[in-house]
Image: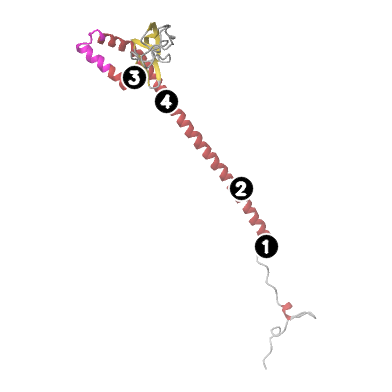
């Protein structure tokens, strides 16, 4: 006979009233498994952080756009100031050349613009014109106090408004800037002169002479 090894066929003691499943050992809960409530709280926290990051990104984007607009305005202002400074410098240079141009004009009127002096004078006038200098002032044009300076005044029967009858010194402009007005002699209509009508008759000629006496 074989001897039975004690303990192999023995069943564990089961308390009275308990099911056989109660006798089996239960598996221990896995470590790190968070309850459902904790997961919801983590999702809510991550959502709040994402909203904060999105808000901060929007604020930084708005700041960048504002800085770009300010930089563009600064560039335009600097470019405008640069052009203004350049125009002022050119206008000052041309102003210094006006007496020389006046001498050239007088020499031309007297027939003294000859030889090498004529070539140099014409070159100077060409350079001044390329820089933007424009001469103005003509006889017969209406007097404009914004661009003309009247040095002589007279009356004339053949003008209907204040008119420049002689250009004593031409005016010059640079772009929209008048650097010297034209100095002129002006004539005004004769005081008390009768106005000539379009049909050639003078004012006052159409008065009735009254019936002739028989």
Magenta stretch, overall SS: helix
In the image, what residue occupies the spot 56% across and 44% down? 58
Marks 4/3: CA–CA distance: 20 Å
On residue 170, the disc is: none
Q: Which comes sooner in the sequence, label 2 or label 1?
A: 1
Between residue 139 and residue 126, name the one nearer to us.
Answer: 139
**Disc 3 on helix, strand or loop?**
strand
What residue is disc 2 on? 52
CA gap between label 1 and label 4 equals 69 Å
Mark sitting earlier along the chain (4/3): 4
Q: Quadrant of residue 158?
A: top left
Q: Which residue is mark 4?
A: 82
| Residue bounds of the magenta highlight | 109-124
The circle drawn on residue 36 is 1
Q: Residue at x 20, y 11 (%)?
A: 114
Of callouts 3 and 2, the N-terminal one: 2
Checking the image for residue 133, the label placed there is 3
Disc on the earlier residue, 1 or 4: 1
Residue 1, image x, y percentages: 67, 94
Residue 41 lies in quadrant: bottom right
Disc 2 or 4, which lies upstream in sequence? 2
| Nearer-the-camera pick, 114 or 140 | 140
- Residue drawn at x 20%, y 12% is 116
Report helix, strand or loop for mark 1: helix
Mark 2 falls on what kind of element? helix
Q: Real-space Cα distance between discs 2 and 4?
A: 45 Å
Measuring from the top left, give residue 22's x and y in whole percent. 74, 77
């Amino acid at each position: 006979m074989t001897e039975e090894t004690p303990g192999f066929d023995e069943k564990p003691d089961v308390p009275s009233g308990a099911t056989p499943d109660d006798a089996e050992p239960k598996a221990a809960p896995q470590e790190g498994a968070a309850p459902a409530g904790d997961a919801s709280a983590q999702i809510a926290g991550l959502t709040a952080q994402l909203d904060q990051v999105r808000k901060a990104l929007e604020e930084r984007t708005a700041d960048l756009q504002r800085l770009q607009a300010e930089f563009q305005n600064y560039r335009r202002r600097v470019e405008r100031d640069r052009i203004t400074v350049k125009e002022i410098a050119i206008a000052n240079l041309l102003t210094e050349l006006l007496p020389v141009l006046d001498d050239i004009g007088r020499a031309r009127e007297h027939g003294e613009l000859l030889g090498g002096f004529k070539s140099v004078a014409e070159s100077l006038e060409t350079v001044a014109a390329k820089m933007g200098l424009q001469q103005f002032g003509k006889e017969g044009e209406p007097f404009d106090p914004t661009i003309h300076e009247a040095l002589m005044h007279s009356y004339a029967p053949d003008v209907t408004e204040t008119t420049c009858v002689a250009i004593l010194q031409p005016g010059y402009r640079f772009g929209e800037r008048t650097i010297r007005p034209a100095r002129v002699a002006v004539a005004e209509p004769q005081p008390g002169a009768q106005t000539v009508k379009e049909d050639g008759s003078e004012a006052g000629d159409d008065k009735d002479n009254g019936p002739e006496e028989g």
